[in-house]
């Protein structure tokens, strides 16, 4: 026999009503709890970053409800010493350097013919180089001649004073700066140096090699390309017998390997990761480097002071050689000139384009590829600068132009490759033998 269940103290209807009331209380409590504001957790506040750029849509002028742009911080691209960024293999900086800009009277006469209102215009002369020059990350010219006062008087050899408008042509081609240390730097004295540097700066160009004061002479010229600081140094072997005034020994840089080493070290201390040196040196009209050029090249290479040496002054194309791992372009000939006796040698020129990349070993930037772009000064029917590889690809060339330009390309290639440059990796644009 089993015992009967114990009867409840509340009848069934009361129990049902009590259950409904309890359920209602729970629901209301839960709704209040979930909707009530809560203090943030430490993880929500500590170290947090905002993704907003400027407050509400009313503050920024955006439509109500429109998404606010996320703030972004670009990643640093400057390699730190002793480190290698994971993206280094894909990074390249192209630096282009060209031969002498030597403004003879027939050059400014052509610019006057191209200009208006008796003002010379050099842009048409340089126009043929614009694709190559403008395509480089950093393009450096060599302005050999000092500049005259605005409007002249202009002077040719032996003491040059060129129209300031030549800088407009240089700028229009895509150059970013110029070396200005040459054997003609002091042709117009101290005032000529100051006038030239002032004009170069007004044209929006950088400059290196001649200075207006001692403080300026101590500061390295540094360009920042893709967030990488690049120094440009400039020196000359000769001043044609002239000397700076005693109170201004810093007026123009002279070639001395130990001085170059110190200047390169100072540039690196200032942050430069690439150092380019432009040297005005050599024997005029000689296609081979002289003993002094070779001696200085060996010393600079042994010191490891600079990453690329670019030579000027010979008015003739000279070889490009790799000396103990350092590329030396002994002489790039004339970029722009019109000598009293025009000849193939003084109409031929070259631009050097170095592709720099960080080393996988220590992160230091080094030349990963070197290419030469032969150029030519066309005199007929108008004085124009010719990028030979680009011109020879033009089907509209006349037979005479094609013959002359092909011959110039062959000559220039032969001079550039005269000291084993091809074996070291030098390429020549437009040269089918490469």
Image (tube, rainbow, N blue to C red):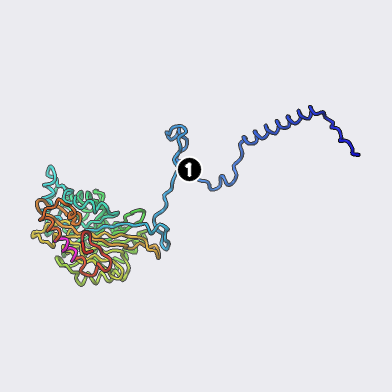
Q: Which residue is drawn at 14% across and 45% down?
A: 115
Toward the viewer: 202 or 375? 375
**Region in magenta:** 407-414
| Residue 53 location (% of width, % of height) | 45, 41
Q: Is residue 410 visible?
A: yes
Q: Residue pushed farthest top?
A: 13
The percent coordinates of residue 218 (x first, y second) are 31, 59
User: Is 295 one of the magenta-colored residues?
Assistant: no
Estimate the x, y position of residue 336 in percent, counting from the top left: 16, 56
The residue sitting at 28% across, 54% down in the picture is 136
Dominant secondary structure of the residues highlighted in magenta in the image: helix
Q: Measured along the vertical axis of the image, is residue 356 above or below residue 293?
A: above
- The residue lying at 31 percent from left, 65 percent from top is 306
**Label 1, residues with CA under 10 Å away: few <14, some 14-19, many ≥20:** few
The residue under label 1 is 51
* Number of numbered discs: 1
Q: Residue at x 82, y 28 (%)?
A: 11
């Amino acid at each position: 026999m089993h015992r009967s269940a114990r009867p409840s103290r509340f009848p069934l209807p009361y129990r049902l009503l009590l259950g409904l009331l309890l359920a209602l209380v729970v629901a209301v409590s839960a709704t209040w709890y979930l909707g009530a504001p809560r203090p943030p957790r430490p993880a929500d506040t500590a170290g947090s970053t905002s993704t907003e750029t400027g407050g509400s849509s009313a503050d920024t002028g955006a439509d109500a409800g429109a998404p606010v742009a996320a703030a972004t911080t670009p990643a640093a691209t400057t390699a730190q010493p002793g480190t290698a960024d994971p993206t280094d293999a894909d990074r390249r900086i192209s630096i282009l350097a060209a031969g002498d800009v030597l403004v003879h009277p027939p050059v400014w006469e052509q610019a006057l013919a191209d200009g208006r209102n008796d003002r010379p215009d050099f842009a048409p002369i340089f126009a043929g180089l614009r694709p190559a020059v403008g395509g480089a990350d950093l393009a450096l010219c060599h302005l050999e001649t000092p500049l005259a006062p605005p409007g002249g008087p202009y002077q040719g050899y032996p003491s040059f004073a060129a129209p300031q408008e030549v800088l407009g042509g240089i700028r229009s081609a895509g150059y970013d700066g110029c070396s200005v240390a040459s054997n003609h730097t002091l042709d117009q004295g101290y005032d000529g140096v100051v006038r030239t540097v002032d004009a170069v700066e007004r044209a929006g160009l950088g400059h290196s090699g001649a200075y207006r004061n001692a403080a300026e002479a101590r500061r390295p010229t540094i360009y920042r390309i893709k967030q990488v600081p690049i120094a440009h140094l400039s020196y000359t072997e000769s001043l044609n017998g002239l000397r700076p005034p005693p109170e201004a020994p810093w007026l123009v840089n002279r070639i001395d390997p130990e001085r170059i080493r110190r200047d390169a070290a100072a540039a690196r201390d200032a942050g430069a990761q690439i150092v380019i040196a432009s040297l005005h040196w050599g024997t005029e009209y000689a296609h081979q480097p002289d003993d002094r050029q070779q001696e200085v090249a060996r010393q600079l290479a042994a010191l490891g002071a600079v990453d690329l040496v670019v030579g000027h002054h010979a008015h003739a194309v000279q070889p490009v050689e790799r000396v103990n791992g350092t590329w030396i372009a002994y002489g790039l000939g004339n970029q722009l000139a019109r000598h009293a006796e025009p000849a193939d040698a003084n109409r031929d020129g070259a631009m050097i384009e170095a592709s720099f990349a960080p080393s996988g070993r220590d992160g230091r930037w080094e030349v990963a590829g070197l290419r030469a772009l032969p150029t030519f000064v066309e005199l007929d029917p108008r004085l124009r600068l010719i990028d030979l590889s680009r011109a020879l690809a033009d089907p509209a060339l006349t037979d005479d132009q094609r013959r002359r330009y092909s011959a110039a390309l062959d000559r220039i290639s032969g001079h550039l490759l005269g000291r084993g440059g091809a074996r070291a990796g030098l390429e020549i644009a437009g040269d089918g033998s490469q």
